[in-house]
Image: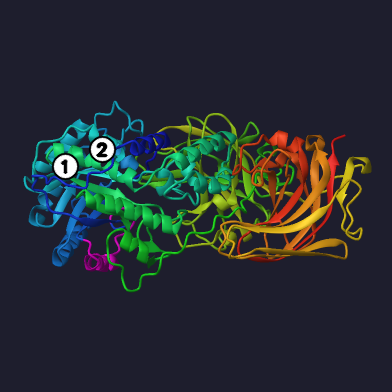
Amino acid sequence: MMIAARWLFVLALIGVGCSLARVVETQTQSTTQALSLQRGVNLTGWFQFGEFQEARFSEIQLLRDSGIDFIRLPIQPTLLYDQKSTTWALLKRVLLEARRVKMRVIVDFHSALNTQREILTGDQRFLELLGSMGTFLLPFLDVALLEPMNEPISPTADTCDPAFDWDSWQKKFYQAARATNKDITLVLTGACWGGIDGLLKSQPIADKNIMYSVHYYDPMMFSHQGASWTGAESRFLKNIPYPPTPANVAAITPSVLNQMPTAALKNQMRDMLSAYGKSGFEFATIANRLAIAQAWATKNNAKLLLGEFGALIDEAPPQDRVRYVNDVRNAAERLGIAYAMWDFNPNGGFGPYRNGQPEKGMFEAMGARAPTNAVPTPANAVPNSTYLLNPVPSNQLLIADFANGSQNVFGTPTTYYAYGQPTQPTFTPAINNAAPVQNGQLEFDFKVPNSNDYGGVVTNIPVAKQGIFDARVFGFIRFELSLVGGGQVRVGVASSKVDDNGDRFQFTVDATDTPTVYTLALEAFRQGGWGKKVVLEDVLRQLEQIEVTAMNTGQPSRIRFDNLVLLNMVEASVVPNVPAALQNVLFDFSLAGQAGNQGGEWSVSAYQQNAARVATATSEIIGNTLKVNFDIPQPNEYAGASVNLNFGSVRNLLNTNALRLELSALGAQTVRVEFPSTLDSANDHPQFRVQVSPQQTTYRIPISEFYQAGWGKAVDRLEALRNAKGINVIVDTVGTKGTLRLDQVVLEQKP
């Protein structure tokens, strides 16, 4: 695996896979003489990032005991460019241990992106390394295979560029390895990240001692949900189901769309989710796709290896993740294809570990026996409709407005610095690292050299004059950003009180030349993963700074950043001075349970999906408020308790500025407020979600903030608001029990 995923390619695969004929479950034996492999894993984190962990030698024995017969060992080739490097000795130890337990090892040159660019533009050191490795592996022909390059892509375009002549490069690598080792099994691949389409376009090399590898992560929408490195879309994905249906995808669509930072991305994601829900992607789709690759290998007298597959643990439903991995593995086994799941690492993101503990379901899904200390795979979470909504812009805390010079409105002067190895990146000089402010915005030039496998330029923007700020009451960060030439910019929240330099909670946006306003939900921020584990809420409780990191490498660029704001979800307790003539008091429960001067009747009800687990809602008027006791039991996919306020006649809410209501709740954190209409069904009202507390608070929600839910029949939002027949106030968090209090429901009319 490397930094790679392009969604148009992914959607094309969904369509192609569904149209193929069903699999023929027979296998024609190849006549190659490659070492026999069957069931494997990618043993990551040893020769890729940082120091080798000697204590993990026990994993080789653990894998053999569980039924794994080979490992694919990713190695960053730069670690071996120096013949005196200790990495050579450590690799020898791995091969000797593998021989002891009767395991095969694929020595996989797994380049970082910048290293691969250098190799594919003529770095002679890599060809020399292939020759050296061929010699090094001569005593290990009974154990070792050699894979010259992982997931090749164009060195100039970072894409599946059809003009990229991968076959010529692969032939050079093949010849360099064969020059010093005539007998070792070589593992070759196709272009385009080593996918099946790349393999089908490859020109095979006539050698009986070759295997061809493919990687399979389709559908990426499922396998890479929550991934921060594969493009803007996947970072927002959460609870994407497998296999998909129109219904189960529609259930999670509103919460996913709400995470999109721009309107354009929201529209794009809506279309992608719809296509995924209708795709019919299942076991047969996977098996048919792998059968195409197997047919190519059989035709060319070569064995096929499924070198990588898996699903990221971060956001995938746990049971669906197990089913997906099991389906891919079973499809490969039925076709007689050897396979290696990505990845095996207690701290890895794709493998059979959960919170550092072996996960029973995932071990079994990859065809292995689970260790005796394995923990069970958790149940899928109940789809949660309590997602955050786009905030009301007027309720905000301005952190930095650089039109006021280098001094922030709320914090202290901003600083910036550069990092990276082996050569420090360059950036615009400034006195004492003070961030340069030009043209009323933070603006500086920088260049991160191509020789950095990682590197960047960081701007630190403090959020409080005293150094610490409690940001838990805010749901969003908003800022304006542009980057000359486009590229990725990472935004992070940081607190030295709870974390260190290696574990920021962060989010990566795709910036362009055009200044764009981004609104990021804080709940979408993910920990970097290379430091100690920290809880986001703890960081927000003692937030010290926002970090903005430009990561473009290999070309000069300029970043422009301005108007950094923290946003609340609603305008809590901010009630403007509205003339009485423009206030329609619909319900005032201080009037002994009577409606207000413009209202109608009210009622309380409960609903649930599971008839065996009945939700309840009882009500009474206590003092000046309507009190509703609710109990919403599990298991229910959806259930709730609703206060139904009927207008008595249809109202045109397009003549209304805002809805104001007084709320408090014990046992629930959010409440859904919606406008039922004469046009719609029970599931598609314009609505807004309010974050509530035990303290009675007046909430003012602009009518413009109410949006169509999207899981019922399609109804025009404006038409629904024009034909509103009432207001529903709903507690719908399954598994909660408590009390809701409601009073003073007011519509503010436009002047």
- The residue sitting at 84% across, 36% down in the picture is 750
- Residue 256 position (above or below residue 638): above
Asked whether residue 262 is drawn in magenta, I would say no
- The residue sitting at 12% across, 48% down in the picture is 185
Residue at the spot of label 1: 128
Q: Is residue 363 left or right of residue 448?
A: left
Q: Is residue 2 left or right of residue 589?
A: left
SS for callout 1 = helix
Disc 2 marks a residue whose amino acid type is Ile
Q: Name, please, the residue furthest toward the front.
A: 611
SS for callout 2 = helix
Pick the front one: 479 or 31: 31
Q: Is residue 234 visible?
A: yes
Residue 88, located in which quarter of the rendered image?
A: bottom left
Where residue 457 appears, as percent x and y from the top left, is: 48, 43
Residue at the spot of label 2: 119
- Residue 91 position (above or below residue 400): below
Q: Is residue 75 left or right of residue 270?
A: left
Residue 541, located in which quarter of the rendered image?
A: bottom right
Which contiguous range is marked in magenta?
A: 47-68
Disc 1 marks a residue whose amino acid type is Glu
- Residue 624, labelled with which disc? none
Q: Quadrant of the C terminus?
A: top right
Crowd around label 1: few <14 · some 14–19 · many ≥20 (10 Å): some
